[in-house]
Image (spheres, rainbow, N blue to C red):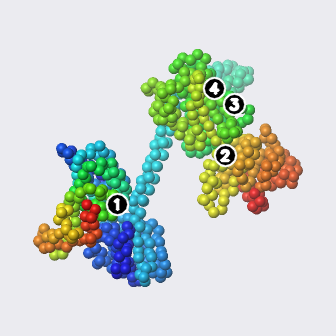
Amino acid sequence: MKRLTINKQILQDELNVELIGSIDEDADFKELQGLQQKTVNFDFKQVNMINSCGIREWIKFLETFPQRNTVVYNNCPQIIIEQINMVHGFFRKGAVINSFYAPYFCESCNKEQKVHLQTDQIKNKKAPKVECPTCKAAMDFDAIEAQYFNFLGKV
Amino acid sequence: MSGFAILDQIFDAAMVLNQKGEITYFNNQSSIFFKMPPRLLKQKKHLNQICESRDLDLDQWLTSAFLSFDVLISPEIKLHLVHEPDTEYSVILKLIPIEGNFAVYFQDKTVENTLHNKYRDQMEELKKTHHQILQADKLSTLGELTATISHEINNPLTIAAGHSEIIKDYLKMKDPLAKLPQLQNANTVVLDSLERVNQIIRNMKDFLHKSEDEKEYCDLEALLNNATEWIRPAAKKANIEIKIEKQAQKVVALANRIKLEQVLINLIKNSVDALKDSNTQEGQIKIILSKSESLQQTIIDVIDNGPGMPAEMKKNLFKPFMTTKDAGRGTGLGLSICAKIIETHRGKIELVESEKGCHFRIRLPLIEVYSYTRNDRSMSGTAKKTKQKRVLVLDNEVQILNVLDAFLKDEDYVFIGSTVPQDALDFLTKASVELIITDFSMPEMTGAQFAEEARRIGYTGPLLYMTSAKFIEQYNKDKKELEISGLIIKPFNREEVMTTVNLALKSHGGKA
């Protein structure tokens, strides 16, 4: 299992954090403490695994961030969305999910796709229409909509 | 199927199977757990199309559950996904009959298992590191003592070499046999000197390589003599006197001899270094061995008349890398290791406030209490349904205690050793035992007097004498009067001891 790597950048009032690898019992967010900026952008695109110990570490870390700072989640993969939907505290009050990945399936190509969506594309917890990049046919949403988009109620 | 929708609210993956073992429902969590979209899960008829286990035949397990129509819980098993064989979980399955069907719950123990393994590996690593630090401290102590040890070896070697020359000269004479008494004397001196060298080397080897965890009954005076022997040459050279004060009664500890010796060498050597560095005139190190009956402790005081400990050092004295010595002369690990070693003996080491010099005190539990409590099973009573029998053995010879300790522990008895009759009697007023074995000839009181006292304070269990055959008359006299159950004749072997012990306990049948 690849250990978590944290890449960070501070640009004006924003802290941009890229998380790469596994968020598990060895995840250590200490290096981000004290770097709070008005806005903190987390990029989860390259997180490939998260377990219950990692979730604890994450929640403990989030608690160290002052409430006045805006926390933004970007490029959340399916495993992160599932945790946000399931675990209280993974997504803190007032935080923003900017974008995420959702599972789609193209019946004609028989192919699964993870489609990058912006949160404002989701209306009434319904998956937006997305066409297959190969055959241009409309793809089916490949999860349970009410469950997958449950996080929108928390935003 | 909406009747099972409640399963969507639980955190574990759950499925419903009909009596043919076909999947008729899966909850929302199943899709996450099996890493499979609902679209594909719907197509799977049987569990073995989704996951497999090398530890448990799932089909057979399900069939047996279906037949019994009862709640069934599996052992913790490894489960891997058919479409992703590299994904392996540790799970416990629970099968519950529900409305003519069966609900299967998958309790995921993977993280718990991973953490447990990590914890175990890290503890193992810590133990190894601890052992390495102890060994490094020994090597460092030995390194610092090398000069004096070489001197110690050189002396007897010089004597041996000189007397070999004498022997050689006598043998060159026309009639060497005329000098036979002188030859024999020279030969004895050579052998004694070489034996002395051999003893020094044996001590060094013991110090470095003896087993780390074994504890035995040790005579503390002998142990102190051994420890001071290492330092005495260096102390003598610096005109420092080392004095051992002890009470008349033999003081015994249940300890790892080599580790305790390491602690004492460290303390005495620190005192020697402090006295040397401060150029103290008439330097003296006093080691006092005593027992506190009220505190139930054995106490070793190491006191010197040197410059004492700087105030700023006192607070962190037992923390690693604290040292008063110049760079290159001490690692600063000595006292922290001493503290750890004493802790493993359920004792305490402390710096006693004193007006002059340095005063360290080591407190060790009395052997009766320590030997009773060190066996956790005797305390918890949970390890076995049958409670272990506790045997109190009283003998002023530590070697006898060590031999009987080995015999009795091998057969799962709780061994409680004592060398002083009064301590053993005090112990009997606080704790109960199922059998007592007592030596007959002891300096403080005879076995008969001890037995009488033990009966007087209410001990009603079996009591065995352990003595030489010449006391058979005494045994015959006491066996009725003091209810002595038997006699173990010295010298004895394992079988003799164990048979006597087992028969005494059996014949007494629960009277204890």
- Work out whether A101 lies above or below B477: below
* Discs 4, 1 touching: Cβ within 8 Å: no
Residue closest to the eye, B483 or B297? B297
Q: CA distance from mark 4 to mark 1?
A: 65 Å
Label 1, on which residue? A88
Cα gap from disc 3 to disc 1, whole angstroms: 66 Å
Write the residue at 26% across / 75% down.
B39
Badge 4, how many Cα within 10 Å: few under 14, some, many 20+? some
Q: Residue at x 87, y 52 (%)?
A: B481
In the structure shown, which secondary structural element does the residue marked by tag 1 occupy? loop
Mark 1 and mark 2 in contact? Answer it, CB < 8 Å.
no
Q: Which quadrant holds the C terminus of chain B?
A: bottom right
Q: Give the amino acid at mark 2.
A: Val
Task: Please tell me which residue is depicted at 61% across the width and 29% down the height of the picture.
Answer: B302
Secondary structure found at label 4:
strand
Check disc 2 and report its element: helix, strand or loop: helix
Spatial CA span between label 1 and label 2: 51 Å
The residue labelled by disc 2 is B369
- Judging from the image, mark 1 belongs to the subunit labelled A
Q: Dot 2: within a 10 Å radius of its alpha carbon, few (fewer than 14), some, or many (20 or more) residues?
A: some
Q: Quadrant of the N terminus of chain B?
A: bottom left
- Mark 3: which amino acid? Lys
In the displayed structure, would residue B60 be above or below residue B415?
below
Mark 1 is surrounded, within 10 Å at the Cα level, by few (under 14), some (14 to 19) or many (20 or more) other residues, namely few
Residue at which label 3 appears: B246
Amino acid at circle 1? His
**Chain where mark 4 sits:** B
Residue A152 appears in the figure: yes
Q: Which mark is residue B286?
A: 4
Asked if one can make out residue B63 in the rendered structure from this viewpoint, the answer is no
